Image (spheres, grey):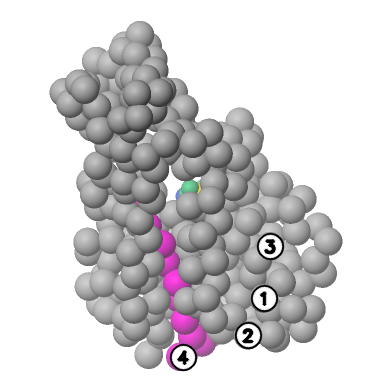
Amino acid sequence: MQFDEKALRHLEVTYRAPEVVAQRRILLETVAARTGERALDIGCGPGFVTEELARAVGAGGDVQAMDNSESSVEMTRQRCAGFGNVQVRAADATKLPYPDNHFDFAVSTQVYEFLADVQAALSELHRVLRPGGRAAIIDTDWHTILWHSGDPGRMARVLKAWDEHLAHAELPRTLGPLLRGTGFSVMECKVISYLDTKFRPEGYSYNMTKTIRGFVRDRHGISRQEADAWAEEMQELAQAGAYFFNLNRYLFLAEKH
Ligand SMILES: C[S@@+](CC[C@H](N)C(=O)[O-])C[C@H]1O[C@@H](n2cnc3c(N)ncnc32)[C@H](O)[C@@H]1O
């Protein structure tokens, strides 16, 4: 999946969805940022999380944000231009450009599932946190999805092709043991469930339908026409009052020991 400028513009719209706004509130409550803390946002994307962290730690705190996509770095810089406590860099999650034992906490939402080498990224996360530092990580388990269709075979083919957009479609299932094996204590695991029975234009599933339609075209034998027909069916189901979408994300709060 390429996080270029066009993708970032659409991600910005998608991440204004009420479900994602609520997720950021849960993230902020769970990580319990205090004024004056040093925070790190790994894979900052459009920068909404970075902006909220900047407010939470206040002018006396420090927020470092990083991403390996130049478009993400640029968008986060623009979003946070009014904050003197934010610095944004281009870097890779598996080679963090920060000193050892530096941050009070770090967050990484919807990033590790894209990484081929999750273990390398967790080791880096562990290295840059101070002892007792917190890590809040959110990833989606795409195989929890319940997405109704009158053509279940086509839906299954579309979702199989969509699995190719990331490295680990089921990362949350193994993240607890991975964190413990890296030297963290897992303090909490919460489910964040996205439910839409209306196909609301401002909602997550409406906007992701556009993303998925574009991604699956010409993959796994799915033609442009079939991808379009799949997306159109969602609209038809909504008009018939028969739309149903449910997907789970998982939030892990861990502590470095
Ligand atoms: C789905 S977006 C999530 C953005 C943001 N964390 C949020 O939740 O609003 C995934 C982000 O991870 C970034 N990313 C993917 N692989 C990365 C890597 N190896 N190092 C740093 N960032 C990466 C992408 O460029 C993209 O901005």
Q: Residues within 10 Å of mark 2 (few under 14, many from 20)?
A: some
Label located before the other in sequence (1 or 2):
2
Callout 4 secondary element? strand
The numbered disc on residue 51 is: 3
On the image, numbered disc 2 is attached to which residue? 34
Picture quarter containing residue 214? top left
Q: Amino acid at mark 4?
A: Pro
Residue 91: percent from left, percent from top:
57, 56
Q: For the magenta stretch, what is the residue range?
A: 130-140
Q: Residues within 10 Å of mark 3 (few under 14, many from 20)?
A: many
Distance in Å between CA atoms under marks 1 and 4: 21 Å
Specify the principal SS of the magenta part. Answer: strand
Report the residue at 83% width, 61% height from top: 82
**Residues tagged 1 and 2 counted as in contact (Cβ below 8 A):** yes
Distance in Å between CA atoms under marks 2 and 3: 15 Å
For the residues carrying marks 1 and 4, which lies nearer the camera in this image?
1
Q: Amino acid at mark 1?
A: Ala
Instruction: Depth check: give the residue in front, 36 or 191.
Output: 191
Mark 4 Cβ inside 8 Å of ligand 1: no
